[in-house]
Image (cartoon, helix red, strand yellow):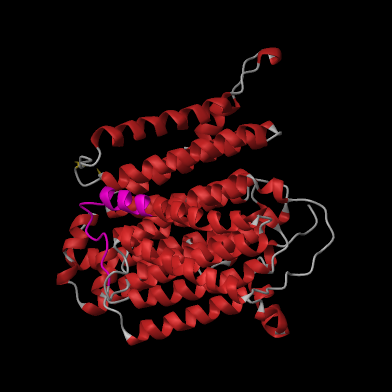
Amino acid sequence: MMTILQTLLSNTSSKKSKKADLTGIIPVFFWAMFIANLIFILVYFPDIPEWQWGEIIRTNGFTALLMTTVTFFSAIITTYANFYFKERGQKNLFMALSVAFTLVVQIFLIAEHLLLLVVGWLLMGWVMSKLIGLNTNWNDARGAKKLSRNYFLAGTLLLGLGLLIPAVYNNTITLSSWIASLEQTPKYMLLLSAVCIIVAALIQSAIFPFHKWLLSSMTAPTPASALMHAGFVNGSGIILTLVAPIILATNTLDMLLIIGGLTAITAQFTKLIQVNVKQRLACSTIAQMGFMIMQCGLGYFNAAITHLILHGFYKASLFLSSGEEIEKQNPKAPPTIRIQWYQALIVLCFSLIGAYLFALWTGKGMDWNSGIFLTLIASITVGQVTYNIIKQNPLSGLQKIVLPPLLFVIGIAVYAISYQLVSTFMRGMEVVAAPTVITPFQVVFGFIFLIGFFLMKLGTYRKIPWLYVKLLNLSSPHKNTLLTPKQ
């Protein structure tokens, strides 16, 4: 597929003065796909029709939403790339890979046959590794490509094994029949299958300790990084949602909660010590993927899908504007965090109000279940934003009083609307949300999470040399992908 696309994109007019840059067609193609998908869901919303072609593919509201999102990201990023690349060969290759990647992602999204699902996962990783190693003249880019490819191959093998175990036992070949037959599968088989699928998901989203491939992939051009962080690493949230029944059947939610929560906090620590813009964004992505896995662990798969969509918009914009962040300046000492008692009171009040609005508008946290953790995260987020506005922004006294509540009300409202829309699109899925009863274990983990968050915000880790060095090493690219002389 990729070779054919490259050939088509490389063909130009025989007259050099009238060369037609066919790469300009690619963004138009993606915009047309996005508009067509958008019109489709607007016409049929909220009752998106389900359609299935034998045992091969199936579409529904969930796939329509994600296909619309994917084509939008591809349209934005290829439009940017059309002006970003100066060398024609590299531009042609990127555009060809972008088309291949987008088509493969859509195949993965609509796959009903288990083999097609695994092949889609494999091809996503293969194309992404090609994007990571786009600049073949760099040793570090070639090393990053090889490293990521090995991780993706391992993830595909684990996903295939996880799907294969119940499939062989129950003689099923489609995803829907695979899910329906889980009740007849022995518990030990289900557990082994669930662990394999979870590890495959963790690898793709670069969750600790499988994060080195993402940190090493910053050799990729900015458009490739944007495509990867906006779409590819979010794939774990999709696969975990598709196979959510086996996660519930094996009681592995707490595993996801712990791994996701610890990754989120640790990656936030490592983000604070980065001096490279793209490395800082990579650590941020790892942290956000940790939050997404954490939401799956809480049983809110619709929240995880909402998170990955919003994260895609946010991270794509950050990568495409990352050049604006680069400037020459003398190193500055980390800011000293001092907050007056009245400022702390304002932050606390806004946090509580934000948490209440979050719970009221989304319905999460109103009962004694795992939704309380999501409300807690929302409260922390609101408090952090409020502190940044009060303490760091050059605002007048009146602005500091009016702006924080206005911003967090708008922000929470946008999230609540997005959450409700995603939940509507997911109607008909086997599992949309399955909140669990709060357990003492979850309460203890919640306190650990809070302690880690405040240690991070207070900069305590900077006063502990061994911890600082540990975090620095943890957030460094793999040794085989560090800068080396060109060959």
The image quadrant of residue 199 is: bottom left
Per the image, is 419 magenta?
Answer: yes
Question: Extreme left residue here?
Answer: 184
Residue 382 seen in the figure:
yes
In this picture, residue 237 sits left or right of residue 346: left
**Residue 75 position in % (x across, y down):** 50, 35
Q: Residue at x 46, y 73 (%)?
A: 261
Q: Nearer the viewer, residue 404 or 342?
A: 342
Residue 23 lies, with reference to residue 258, above or below; the image says above
The image quadrant of residue 144 is: bottom right
Q: Residue at x 21, y 62 (%)?
A: 179
Residue 136 seen in the figure:
no
**Residue 22 position in % (x across, y down):** 57, 24
**Residue 181 position in % (x across, y down):** 16, 65
Badge count: 0
In this picture, residue 115 sits left or right of residue 349: left
**Residue 272 position in % (x across, y down):** 66, 68
Per the image, is 207 magenta?
Answer: no
Q: Nearer the viewer, residue 215 or 407?
A: 407
In this picture, residue 13 sits left or right of residue 426: right
Residue 327 lies, with reference to residue 4, above or below; the image says below
Q: Residue at x 74, y 70 (%)?
A: 334
In this picture, residue 443 sits left or right of residue 144: left
Which segment did they paint magenta? 416-435
